[in-house]
Image: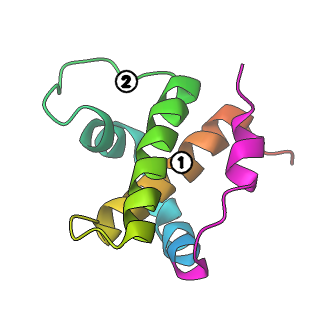
Amino acid sequence: MTDFRFLLRNLRRPRLLIRAARFGLPDYRRERDLRRLLRPGDRAAALPAPAAALADLLAQELRLEASRQAGDAGYSLARHVLLLIALMGEARLLAGPADP
């Protein structure tokens, strides 16, 4: 199984992107946001487990990062931030409850 915590910890992104994602993390709602990011046309499908969602989100984020670095005109900053928020939210779910 892929160690997503290791992969996420080693992502190197501009500080402003990470700060924006951290700022949006308290408003992350799995039901609403994952449906929008993973399967926009299929509202009736069940949501994937956090590990499966992380794999898909990470693949999308890597494509967006390549697009950002290439200066592609189709790059969406808003979608990039939404993906980073979802990655952080799903990573928290995968890690389980915080120690008291």
The quarter holding residue 97 reads top right
Q: Is residue 96 visible?
A: no
Residue 5 badge? none
What's the CA distance linking mark 2 and mark 1? 15 Å
Whole-percent x and y of residue 74?
21, 64
Q: Position of residue 57 (x, y in %)?
A: 45, 40
Q: Amino acid at mark 1?
A: Leu
Q: Position of residue 69 (x, y in %)?
A: 45, 69
**Left or right position of 10 against 17:** right
Residue under pointer 2: 47
**Mark 2, other Cα within 10 Å: few <14 / some 14–19 / many ≥20:** some
- Residue of label 1: 87
Local secondary structure at mark 2: loop
For residue 37, side relative to residue 22 (left or right): left
Q: Quadrant of the N terminus?
A: top right
Q: Quadrant of residue 37?
A: top left
Q: Residue sitting at 51 percent across and 24 percent down?
A: 52
Task: State which mark lies toward you, 2 or 1.
Answer: 1
Labels 2 and 1: the sequence-earlier one? 2
For the residue carrying disc 1, how many other residues have a C-alpha within 10 Å: few (<14), some (14-19), or many (20+)? many
Write the residue at 46% across / 60% down. Answer: 65
Q: Is residue 57 visible?
A: yes
Q: Secondary structure at mark 1?
A: helix
